[in-house]
Amino acid sequence: MGNLQILLRQHVGAPCEAIVKAGDRVEKGTLIATPTGLGANIFSSAYGVVEDVQEDRIIIKPDEEQKDEFVPIAEGSKLDMVKAAGVVGMGGAGFPTGVKLGADLQGGYILVNAAECEPGLRHNILQLEEDCEKVIRGVKYCMEISNAAKGIFAIKKKNEKAVARLREALKDEEAITIHLLPDIYPMGEERAVVRECLGIELETTQLPSAANAIVCNVETLARVTEAIEERKPCFSKNLTVIGKLNGGNEPHVYMDVPVGTSVGELIERAGGIDGVYGEIIMGGPFTGRAVEADEPITKTTGGIIVTIEFPDLHGAKVGLLVCACGGSEERMKDICAKMNGEVASVARCKQAVENKPGAPLKCERPGNCPGQAKNNIQFKKDGCEYIIIGNCSDCSNTVMGSAPKMGLKVFHQTDHVMRTIAHPLYRHLRVSKQVDQLPEGK
Amino acid sequence: MKYGDKIIYMEGVIVEIHDGCVGIDLKGRLGYLKIPMRMLITDYPLVVGQEVGWNMSFVEQLGPEANEKYVSNLDTYQRRQEEMKSRKDDK
Amino acid sequence: MSITAETAKEHAKDPAVLCCRAEAGVTIEAANLEDPAIFDDLVDSNLLNLDGALTIEQVIGATLTKTCDSLTPLTADVLEGIQAVAAPAVEEAPAEEVPAPEAPAVPPVAPVAPHAPCAGGVLKIHIGEGKDIDIEMPMGFNHGAAMAEVPAQVVPVAAPVAEAELEPKVIRSVSRKHYKITEVRRGPETKIEGTVLYIREGIEEEAVASQELVHSLKIDIITPEQYHTYSETIMDVQPIATKEGEDEVGTGTTRVLDGVVVMVTGTDDNGVQIGEFGSSEGYLDENIMWGRPGAPEKGEIFIKTEVVIKEGTNMERPGPLAAHSATDVITQEIREALKSVEDDSLVVDTETFEQVRRPGKKKVVIVKEIMGQGAMHDNLILPIEPVGVLGARPNVDLGNVPVMVSPLEVLDGCIHALTCIGPASKEMSRHYWREPLVLEALHDEEVDLCGVLFVGSPQINAEKFYVSKRVGMMVEALDVDGAFVTTEGFGNNHIDFASHIEQIGMRGISVVGMSFCAVQGALVVGNKYMTHMVDNNKSESGIENEVLACNTLCHEDAIRALAMLKAAMAEEEVAKPEKKWNPNVKATNVELISKTMDKTIELVANEQSLPMSQKRKEKYD
C-alpha cells in the first residue's frame, strides 16, 4: 500500500485545515482536518504516520498491517452524528450531508438518486443489488432527521435486478416507493430527479428544498447509516474502475476504498493499463476530468476510466458545443487538443446557464433539448470541419438532426470512453423518454 | 477583405472629451482613435479615464495604388495647415 | 433554438418546425418549435423543406401523433387537434402573378397580390438582452404600393352628406416669391439690382467682429465654371430667404433668391476642419451630389464662407456655432437687401404652400429625429428669419425634447442645421427647406398630415429614452393612425430612432422608419415594431461615401415610405426583408408603386454620375 494523500479540499466549501502535523501517529478514523467554513470533517483512512502536511494535502504513510477497527465518532443526535462523520454527497457534488439534512421538509421527500447516470459506473447499482437494506435504513434516518414523510428511489428501469431487490425490500415500507427512469442522460442530474419524481421543474438557481425535497445519492445514504449505527467516520469510498485494462473492459467495483489511495494503485489493482491509452479520467465520462496516475481519490470520486487513444484530426478546425451536461469549456478544449484539432468556434447550448460568472453551467431543462440548429449554423460559418459536443442524449440527437447534413462531422466528448467500454455512442436517441411506472411505485 | 471576419475585441481608455468627439487611447499602446460622439454608445455620463470596448478586425490594404484624390486633398490640407500656422506664428 | 410563447405569437403565421425530437402524444408548445429566424439559413443549406408545413398558430396546442425528429416541419398528417385559423392572407395565392420586373437581373421578390398591393419591409433584428446584439442586415421593403385608390372612388357615391363634413380645411399658407440671381459681385453696398446680387466689400470684418471665436472669414463666390475648386468640408448649404414685413416663419410671404446658395466651410487656427468628421473636403464638383434636397443644384452660384475659428474649438459647442453665426451676418445683410427690393417684376415665380387638414382621412405625423449630441451635432430651431440664427434655440439647450412644428414651418426654414457625420447622410439646412417627405405627405389627399415633430438625439442613452418616451406620449395624444420616424446619418442616433418607433408602435400606431442603413449604417438595435423600414441609401455599394447629401431622404424614398405607411394603416401584410441588403428590393418597390400610381418615378442619380478618376472608380463608389 503506497502513501495516502488526503486532500484538504474534498467537497463544496473552503478547504479544511489540518489539525495534525508531520510525525503524528494516526488511526483509521482519526480526525485530521476540520472545516474552516462550510465543509465537513476529514479523517485518516488508515493506521500510520503523518509523513507531511502540505498546503493542499496531508500525506500519511500507512502501516504494513491494517486492522478493521476504527476510531468511532462521539454519540449524539442522528444529525450530529452525520455531521461529525463528515458525510458528503458522494455522487460527485460533495455538499455536506449534515447541512443538507438540517432543513425541515415539513412532510416532504427524500429522493434517492440511484440513477447512476454516468455510463460505465456500476458501484451504486451493485450496492443496491447486494445490500439495499443499509441504504433503505439510511433513507429512513434522513426522513426522520429532516421531517420528510416520503422516500422515493429514482432508478433506471434497465437495472432489473436492483429494482427487483428493492421491490422485495420495500414491499412493507409504506412511506417509500420506486420511480423508474428512462435510460437517457442526464436523469441523475439533481433537478432532473426532482422533476421526474415530483413533476416540478426547478429554476437553475433553486435547490431541491424549493420542492420540499432532498436528493441523496445511494452511497451517501449508506454512509449515513454507518455513521448512525456504527459511529463510523466517512473515510472510504465505493468506486468503479473500468477501461482499457489488462483482462478486459468489464467494470471493477471496489467498496470502501480508503480515501487518499492513488488512481495508479487502483488501476493496478484492476489489472493495470493494457498497452497504450488515451487518458485517465477521474469521475464519469461526461463530467469527469483527465488526471495523472498519482492523483488521490476523494470522498466524491466515483470512477476511474482508462480510455483508448484519441483519433487524430490533423489540425482540422473544430467547433465546441459546450453544455451543462458535459465537460466545461476547459475540458472540451482539453479533449480537442488531445484530438489534435484547432478550436475555431465555441457555442453554448441555449439552456446552459451560468448562475454566477464562472460557476459551473446548469441546464434549465435537463434532458429536454432546446434546439441546436443555430449552433450548427455558427460552426459552419466559422469554417469548422468537425464538432465536439458534450450534450445530453436528447440534445445530441438534435445535433445529429442537422450537423451531418451540413457537412459537420460529429464527435461526442465521451466517444473515446464509449468505444473503450463498448457502450453505444451518444448520437441519435432511440429510446423513449417515457417509461411505464410500477403499480403504485411498488 | 481577406481577413475581415477575424473580429478582435479591443479595449481603450477615454483620454479626451469634447462636445463633439472623444479621443480614445487603445490599450497596449496600439494606437489612438478619435470618434464623433455619434459613434459612441453612452450609458453613463462621460468621464476621462472610462474604459471602452469594441470589435475590430485587422486593417487591410485594398490595393497597391494610392488614390490621387486623397493624396491631393491631403497635400492641400497640410499645406493650408502649414500656411495658417506660419501666419499665426508671424502675428 | 426553441422559442418563447411571445416569439411564437409574433411568428404566428410562420411555418412550424420542431426544434428537437418530440415523442408521440406530446402537446405542441412554443418550446418544441424552432425559431423561424434561422429558417432561411436552413432552407439554403437544404436542411429544411417547408412545403406543407402548418403555421405556428395552427400547431400550438395540437397533439403529435407520431414521434418526429428535430427540424421536422409539422404537417397535418402528424398532428391531431390543429387549431382552426382564418385562411392565410391573400398574398399567398397570387405569388406567381408577381409582375415580373423587366430587367432580368432583378430576382423575383416577395409575392404581391395584384388587386391589393402591399408595401413593406421588415427588418429582422434580434437583441439578446441588449448586450449580445445580433443584426440581420437591414432594410428590405419588398414590393410596395398600396394606393388607396379604391376607397377614394367609392366615397363620393356613397355619402354626399358626409362629404360636406369631411371637406379639407386650409389652416394656413405660405407663399414663396422667387427672385432670380444670375450673378454675384462684390461692391460698396449689399444690394440686388435686377438679377445681380452685390455683397458689400469689407463685410468680412464685421462678420469676424461679431463672434469672439472667429479669427478670420473669407468669402468666395463660386460660379459653375469654378466648381472644380478645392474646398474645406462643407458644413452647411443654406437658401437665402427672408420674411416680408412682420410675417413669421411658416406663414405669410417669404422671398427667396434662386440660383444662389450660401455655403459654410471652415477650419480652426491650426487648419483643422471644423466638421472634422464627415469630411467632404476636396474638389467641389467631385463631392457634391447635385440636386439632393439639401445640396446645391448644378448651375447655382455659391457664396462660400471659409471661417477660421480659435484653435481647438472646432470640437466644442461654441466653435461650429460661431462659424455659422459669423456667416449669418453676411446672409442677414443679403436678407435685408432682399426685403427692400420693391420691383415686383423681379419676381420670377410665386408658389404657395397650403397646410391642409383632411378630416376623415388617416391622420399621420412625421417625427424627424435631429442631432443633439453637441458641438456640430446640433440644430437651431425656429429662427426669426428662414434658416437664420437670431431668435433660434439650439436643440441641445432645449434638452432635445420633442418640438411640434407645422409642415409649413419646416418648408419655411425653421431648422438651421449644424449637423455633421457624414456628408453623405447629413441633412443640410436646405434639406428642410425642400423636405421631400413633408412635401409628399402635405400634398397627398389620402392622408391628413397633422404636423412635424422634431426630436433631438442626445448623447447619453438615459436621455435618449427620456426624450423618446415623450415622443410616445405626444404621438399618443395626437391620436394619429400612422407615423413616420426619420433620422439622418448613423451611429448612436439609431438607438433613439429604434426607441421612437417602439414607443409609437407599442401604442398600436402604424409606423414607418426611414434612415440610411444599407451596409455601413446597419442599425445597432431593433425591436419588434421595426417592421416597416425604408432605406435612404443611394450609393452603389451601400456605404457612407464622402459625397455631400448622397444618402439623404429623397422624393423616391418619401413616396415609398408613404405607400408603406398606407399599407400598414390598412393592415396589409408587409413582406419580410431579404437576409442581406439588396438594392433590387427598392427597385422593385419603386416599380410597383409607379405601376399602381400609373406615373413614372424618376430615380435620382448617385455618386456614379460625378467626375472621378478611373482609379477611384475601381476602388471606391
Image: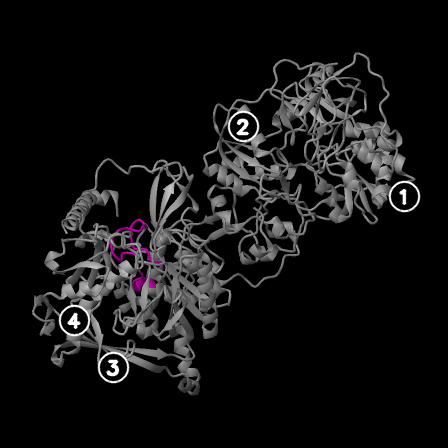
Q: Which residue is at the far front?
A: B91
Name the amino acid, label 2: Cys
- Same chain under badges 2 and 4? The reply is no
In whole angstroms, how far apart are the C-alphas of marks 3 and 1? 99 Å
- Number of the front mark, 3 or 2: 3
Using the image, tell me which numbered label, if any, was put on residue C246: 3
Q: At numbered mark 4, what does the secondary structure look like: helix, strand or loop? A: helix
In whole angstroms, how far apart are the C-alphas of marks 4 and 3? 18 Å
Q: Which residues fall within the magenta stretch?
A: C535-557
Q: Position of residue A39 (x, y in %)?
A: 73, 35
Q: Which residue is mark 2?
A: A336
- In this rendering, the answer to whether C556 lies above or below C332 is above
Subunit that carries the residue with mark 1: A
Subunit that carries the residue with mark 3: C
Disc 4, disc 3: CB below 8 Å? no
Query: Which class describes the residues within 10 Å of circle 1: few (<14), some (14-19), or many (20+)?
Result: few
Q: Main secondary structure of the magenta part?
A: loop
Query: Which class describes the residues within 10 Å of circle 2: few (<14), some (14-19), or many (20+)?
Result: many
Using the image, tell me which numbered label, if any, was put on residue C334: 4
Subunit that carries the residue with mark 2: A
Q: Which residue is at the far left?
A: C188
Write down the quadrant of residue C513 in the picture: bottom left
Name the amino acid, label 3: Glu
Q: At numbered mark 1, what does the secondary structure look like: helix, strand or loop? A: loop
